[in-house]
Amino acid sequence: MARIANCVFFVSMASAAQAQQFSIPDLTPVETQGRAIFSRSCTICHLSQQLGTGTFGPQLSKATLDGDASVLREVISNGMPHMPGFKHMYQPAQIDSIIAYLKTVPAPAPVSPNAAR
Ligand code: HEC
């Protein structure tokens, strides 16, 4: 009995992992636009390339800067010491769409040595 239960568990885990990898979440048109801009202009620094290699910029999510849209707008528009500003490249509405998209990105689980328990 326990063996069958395990089996079902693994199958459902596998399909959950697949869904996560391949399905495109339901986004509004604005969020979709933001995602397109994000993948074009931001992922080069903000997406982890491979596990363990880290990113140049921090990983971004709905939790970034406490999700404060006005602070996010300021950072994205004017940049930071190691990040270019985008106010000459994108209209305010486009920057807002990036923020709308970021608010759909779940916060990454905190990295902790106890995580695998
Ligand atoms: C050239 C690499 C680079 C690009 C391209 C880039 N960033 Fe950044 N970003 C950084 C770095 C590095 C930091 C960390 C602050 C610093 O060192 O300047 C950062 C910080 C941030 C922060 C603040 C995060 C925090 O927790 O303080 C936000 C928000 C952000 N970036 C959004 C974006 C968005 C949106 C784009 C695309 C429009 C983008 N970045 C493109 C490198 C980049």
Image: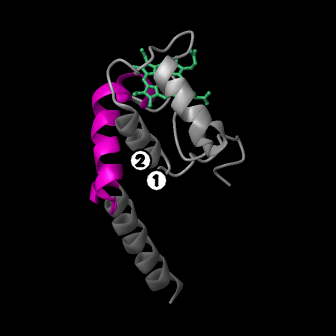
Determine the image quadrant of residue 4.
bottom left
> x, y percentage for residue 2?
53, 84
In the rendered structure, the answer to whether residue 72 lies left or right of residue 16 reads: right
Where disc 2 sits, the SS reads: helix
Relative height, residue 117 to residue 11 (above, below): above
Determine the image quadrant of residue 98.
top left
Classify the position of the C terminus by image quarter.
bottom right
- Give the mark count: 2
Magenta residues, start to end: 21-47
User: Where residue 67 is drawn, which disc sits there?
Assistant: none
Mark 2, residue position:
101
The 10 Å Cα crowd at callout 2, few under 14, some 14 to 19, many 20 or more, is many
Check residue 44 for magenta coloring: yes
Where disc 1 sits, the SS reads: loop
In the rendered structure, the answer to whether residue 88 lies left or right of residue 77 reads: left
Relative height, residue 5 to residue 111 (above, below): below
Mark 1: which amino acid?
Answer: Thr
Mark 1, residue position:
104
